[in-house]
Amino acid sequence: MKERNSNKANSFMIILIFGTAVFIPFSIGILKKDKAISTVEKRALSQLPNSPKTAKDIRAFPESFEKYYSDNFGLRDWFTTFYKLAKYRIGDSPSKDVTIGKNGWFFVGSIKYGYKRYRDPIGDVRNVNLYSHHELQIVSKYMKGLQSWLNKKGIKYVFVIAPNKHTIYFDQLPDYISKEHDRSATDQLFEHLQKHTNVNIVDLREPLIQAKEIHQLYYKTDSHWNFYGANIAQYEIMVEIEKLFPNQIHPEIKPMRDGMKRSGDIANLLGVRILKDHNPLPIFRDTCRLTRHPLGAKGRTTHTFICEGQKLNAVILRDSFFNALEPYFARKFNRSTYIWKWDDQNYSSLTKYIELEKPDIVIEEWVERSLPFIPKGNTDFMKSLRNGVHDKS
């Protein structure tokens, strides 16, 4: 009799626990306000579908509601965070967009067949995303045309590629990732430009590979270089600029100090917030009183730094890799204006700031994971570059 009562009690407890486990998330899901974006998964969530009004709506409603409930049941973020942390703990990537490397290194991208998100940086480092010869001709026409257009205005032009972390820290990728071809898209582009143009090019790969033996140059939990990596990069770029403007700019490696640890964009993709990374910061001694215009400019808004006492003015066409370069560059130029990807090669934007800032130099930076990138703007400027400059390569 006691055994029967004990079994009943156990069954009741199991039912109670199961019911509570189902009821609590359901109840919280009803009471809480629906979110548009998941902060854990970094994606838009399905919204409550409208009441069906037609036979077609009725047929579609169950699937729509299922997607909505799957995205909005109570404690979903908590369960998702726990799941991601558990996968990370056993060495399995919680994100299809992140590859776990060696020694705590994380890389954006995947080797899975057909993967193309985040511009496929794993494919880049495997040398499978390559230019055709025709595409290289188009890019060289663009470069030659832009440089010729600027030179007629008395403005120098420098082109630089910010290397993917995968390129510099290839040794930290999993051993199953190997190269399919000997040359990368970056190799192709630099070789073609050097052979068929006189564009001033800065190849940062070798200096960064050498410097990584001394310092960590990229964040382990972010896709970008840290301030050490940016320190090496800015020095190499300044060396090239100094060749064009002797005695008007002084290349130098800045001293560094330790900053507070931080998590990066890859940690956010993983949804594992415990991951923190070494965060070195540059030390700027005896520099100008730096001012920024417009004062409240944030993110991708075009802005200008002013450092009185410097000799040169610059317009810089950039992407996210220039975030870490800005503190260095802002102190090297009298005026330096930063245009985010210069509005996808928008002629009016570039000409506006050239007329406004009267730069001595235009610096154009592409991130390696954008390759094989081909400028495709339809502005009058781009058309003139394609039609007005003939590349005999």
Image (spheres, rainbow, N blue to C red):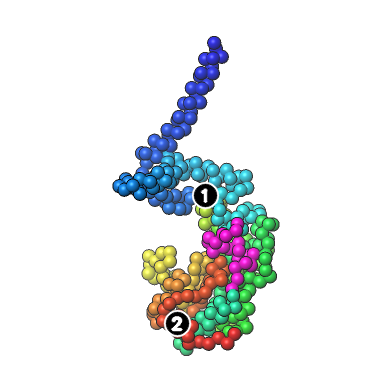
Location of mark 1 (residue): 271
The percent coordinates of residue 227 (x first, y second) are 56, 64
Could you say where residue 343 lies in the image, as x and y percent from the top left? 43, 72
Residue at (57% x, 60% y) in the render: 114
- Asked which quadrant contains residue 237, the reply is bottom right
Q: Is residue 211 visible?
A: no
Q: Amino acid at mark 1?
A: Gly
Q: Which residues are magenta?
A: 112-131
Residue 30 percent across, percent down from the top left: 37, 39
Q: Which mark is residue 320?
A: none
Residue 266 in view = yes
* Residue located farthest toward the left when viewing the structure as drawn: 53
Prevailing secondary structure class for the magenta stretch in the rendered image:
loop
Q: Residues within 10 Å of mark 2 (few under 14, many from 20)?
A: few
Q: Earlier in the sequence, mark 2 or mark 1?
A: 1
Question: Residue sitting at 45 percent across and 29 percent down?
Answer: 19
Neighbour tally class for label 1: few under 14, some 14-19, many 20 plus, Cα within 10 Å? many
In the image, taking residue 361 as reference, residue 184 lies left or right, namely right
Q: Residue furthest bottom?
A: 152
Residue toward you, 300 or 30 = 30
- In this rendering, the answer to whether 3 lies above or below 353 is above
Q: Quadrant of the C terminus?
A: bottom right
